[in-house]
Image (spheres, rainbow, N blue to C red):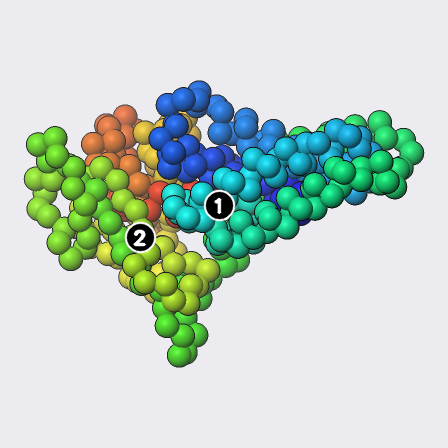
Amino acid sequence: SFIFSGFVKAVDPLGFQYKIQDYLAAFGMTSWFPSFFPLLGGILLSAAEFSIGIFLFFGIKRTLSTTLALMLMIFMTPLTLYLAIFDPVSDCGCFGDAWVLTNWETFAKNIVLLIAAIAVFQWRKMLVRFVMEWLISLYTVFFVFTLSFYCLDRLPVLDFRPYKIGQNIMQGMSIPDGAKPSVYESVFILEKNGEKKEFTLENYPDSTWTFVDTRTVLKEKGYEPSIHDFSMMELSTGDDITEDVLTDMGYTFLLVAHRIEEADDSNIDLINEIYDYSVEHGYKFYCLTSSPEEQIELWKDKTGAEYPFCQMDDITLKTIIRSNP
């Protein structure tokens, strides 16, 4: 479990960073840590998990590995119990996108691992011991850190996301005959005269309200397809154009910037060239973001962007692609 958990986090360090940010936001602790903490902490934690697993497997660094394993499970087991009871985040992220568990499933798994960690710690001197401990330790740490930083620069070498290259979004959203689908609802947070309120598509207000954020909410649990929150709302009209885009037989270019205010504009000339190319050839081009309208207008002023914008759930955008332009 430690090896697998550490590995799937190491191949997707940005995905684990987003999960840590969700935890900090859920507990109101975002301001307690510097901005680099979620990414650095995620890389260090995934490296620690993977290394502990390898050390236990080979019976090396027995006191260190068994102590760290026990400490980690003593911390994680009560935390996952809290998550299971109060559900501040829907997925603990233990195994990234490779294997999604409910919070109660995660707690049950941690109970088993805690018992195993206690047993291994108690009988650590009986572990089979391999020679050349230093060599295995060195290569383990070198491998996991190299893997993390390579995937951070180049995107995951093993992609477990539902939006990986080659996936069919329409098929990913489809539900087998006879299966009862989960019911989701897009919730939009808007502001007017300093007051923030939540709206749905059914009661979306007039243009005097300013967009702040959007999220997808599960209303009724049912069969859950691998893709369930892909919904494009065109900013200029407020229309849901998801089906129009997915059923269009031509090309559609999607510029994904989950937070446009955090995007880097150093390659904006290349992006604008692609937009000009799409216009010349009659292809659709949309920028997908979860940023509020005022940030989009600032981006337009700064970059000369003329392409249309659509708003989408922030987590969905970060799942589609880990990078931000």
Q: Nearer the viewer, mark 1 or mark 2?
A: 1
Image coordinates of residue 67 in percent, x first then y, are: 71, 31
Tag 2: residue type? Val
Tag 1: residue type? Leu
Vertical comparison of 214 with 248: above or below: above
Q: Residue furthest bottom?
A: 178
Q: Residues within 10 Å of mark 1 (few under 14, many from 20)?
A: some
Vertical comparison of 150 with 223: above or below: above
Compare residues 57 and 279 and report the one nearer the observer: 57
Which quadrant of the structure image shows residue 306? Answer: top left
- Residue 108 visible (yes or no): yes
Q: Please give the residue where the numbered disc 2 appears in the rendered image.
A: 217
Image coordinates of residue 213 in percent, x first then y, are: 26, 40
Alpha carbon distance from label 1 to label 2: 22 Å
* Residue for point 22% across, 46% down: 188
Q: Residues within 10 Å of mark 2 (few under 14, many from 20)?
A: few
* Residue for point 49% across, 53% down: 104
In this rendering, position of residue 116 left or right of residue 129: left
Q: Please give the residue where the numbered disc 1 appears in the rendered image.
A: 81
Disc 1 secondary structure class: helix
Image coordinates of residue 148 in percent, x first then y, are: 62, 34
Vertical comparison of 120 with 97: above or below: above
In this rendering, position of residue 12 left or right of residue 311: right
* Residue for point 16% across, 42% down: 197
* Residue for point 86% across, 30% down: 133
Disc 2 secondary structure class: strand
Compare residues 255 and 5 and report the one nearer the observer: 5
